[in-house]
């Protein structure tokens, strides 16, 4: 059987515990929301970087089909120029590397976070590769 | 005294619950609104890229504009984005070796989450860039 002093002691011990608990819960909730939103924005920027890199790589891998049939590789200067044209239109900066008929483009995109995001990368990089082929499948008849 | 303490505390749980539920609802509205803006922004970007690819496949600027508009509207509809106002503009040339840019502007309704300060609507912009292939199939 609980005596009055015991009951009072228990009441005193519990007093004020709800508000700190609520504050802690709300703080965790806010951190969770902040993480979710920042991660979403970073993901969006990453997709943008990949898309720009892919468009630039596709442009750079455009080659003269007659030269390809003859076994030529991409002209690095013209490939760079085509990639640069696409990158200029997107407004991003990137680097282009060409190896024979393969073009790799890396694009860096600054992430515009809605809230200050320490711990999240301020810039994300997307890399895409394109290969110049003869015909659609690379198995052009008569090639 | 225990009796006085009990009387003083009486009814606070209901008030606490009301405040907590209101707060949680506001947080939920905020999360829904923020994710809708971020998600829809990504959808508008993706639609703009699809529109740019469609425009780059056209042989005529007017056809490119029409193709971009159709593809952007379709891509947004497929993703469940309802634009109150949708504007699609095509910039650039469609000659082989040119660069085509498609700008998309979509105003989405946020009236249901305006309570937490998002405003009744928001305009989201997206851009897609595509290189016009040097060699293209089909008839010009």
Image (cartoon, coloured by chain):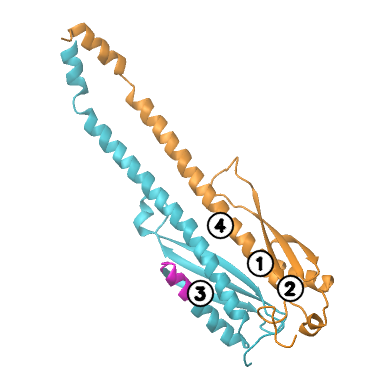
Chain colours: A orange, B cyan
> Which subunit holds the residue at mark 1?
A
Q: Position of residue A98 (x, y in %)?
A: 79, 66
Q: Which residue is mark 2?
A: A61
- In this view, the residue in front, B108 or A53, is A53
Q: Which residue is mark 3?
A: B72
Are the two marked residues, 2 and 3, in contact with CB atoms closer than 8 angstroms? no
Left or right: A113 with respect to B111? right
Say which element carries label 3.
helix
Left or right: B88 with respect to B16? right
Q: Could you say which quadrant of the image residue A120 lies in?
A: top right
Q: Confirm whether the magenta stretch covers residue A135.
A: no
Label 2: few (<14), some (14–19) or many (≥20) C-alpha neighbours in 10 Å: many
> Which subunit holds the residue at mark 2?
A
> Which subunit holds the residue at mark 3?
B
Q: Nearer the viewer, mark 1 or mark 3?
A: 1
> Which subunit holds the residue at mark 4?
A
Are the two marked residues, 3 and 4, in contact with CB atoms closer than 8 angstroms? no
Label 3: few (<14), some (14–19) or many (≥20) C-alpha neighbours in 10 Å: many
Q: Could you say which quadrant of the image residue B91 lies in?
A: bottom right
Are the two marked residues, 2 and 1, in contact with CB atoms closer than 8 angstroms? no
Q: Position of residue B126 (x, y in %)?
A: 56, 66
Cα separation, mark 2 vs mark 1, equals 10 Å
Q: Position of residue B28 (x, y in %)?
A: 37, 47
First of labels 4, 2 by sequence position: 4
Q: Which residue is mark 4?
A: A44
Cα separation, mark 1 vs mark 4, equals 15 Å
């Amino acid at each position: 059987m609980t005596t009055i002093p015991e009951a009072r002691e228990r009441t005193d011990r519990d007093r004020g515990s709800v508000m700190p608990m609520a504050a802690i819960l709300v703080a965790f909730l806010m951190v969770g929301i902040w993480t979710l939103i920042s991660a979403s924005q970073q993901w969006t920027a990453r997709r943008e970087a990949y898309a720009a890199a892919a468009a630039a790589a596709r442009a750079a891998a455009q080659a003269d089909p007659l030269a390809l049939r003859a076994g030529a590789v991409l002209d690095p200067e013209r490939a760079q120029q085509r990639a640069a044209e696409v990158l200029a239109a997107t407004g991003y900066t990137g680097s282009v590397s060409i190896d024979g008929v393969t073009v790799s483009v890396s694009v860096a995109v600054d992430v515009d976070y809605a809230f200050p995001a320490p711990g999240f990368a301020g810039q994300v990089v997307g890399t895409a590769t394109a290969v110049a082929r003869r015909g659609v499948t690379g198995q052009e008849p008569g090639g | 005294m225990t009796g006085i303490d009990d009387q003083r505390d009486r009814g606070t749980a209901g008030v606490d619950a009301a405040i907590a539920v209101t707060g949680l609802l506001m947080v939920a509205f905020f999360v829904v609104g923020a994710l809708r803006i971020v998600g829809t922004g990504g959808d508008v970007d993706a639609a703009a890229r699809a529109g740019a690819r469609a425009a780059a496949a056209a042989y005529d600027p007017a056809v490119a504009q029409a193709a971009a508009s159709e593809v952007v509207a379709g891509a947004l509809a497929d993703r469940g984005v309802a634009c109150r106002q949708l504007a699609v503009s095509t910039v650039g040339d469609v000659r082989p070796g040119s660069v085509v840019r498609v700008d998309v502007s979509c105003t989405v309704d946020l009236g249901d989450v305006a309570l937490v300060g998002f405003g009744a609507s928001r305009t989201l912009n997206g851009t897609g860039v595509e290189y016009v292939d040097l060699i293209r199939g089909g008839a010009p």
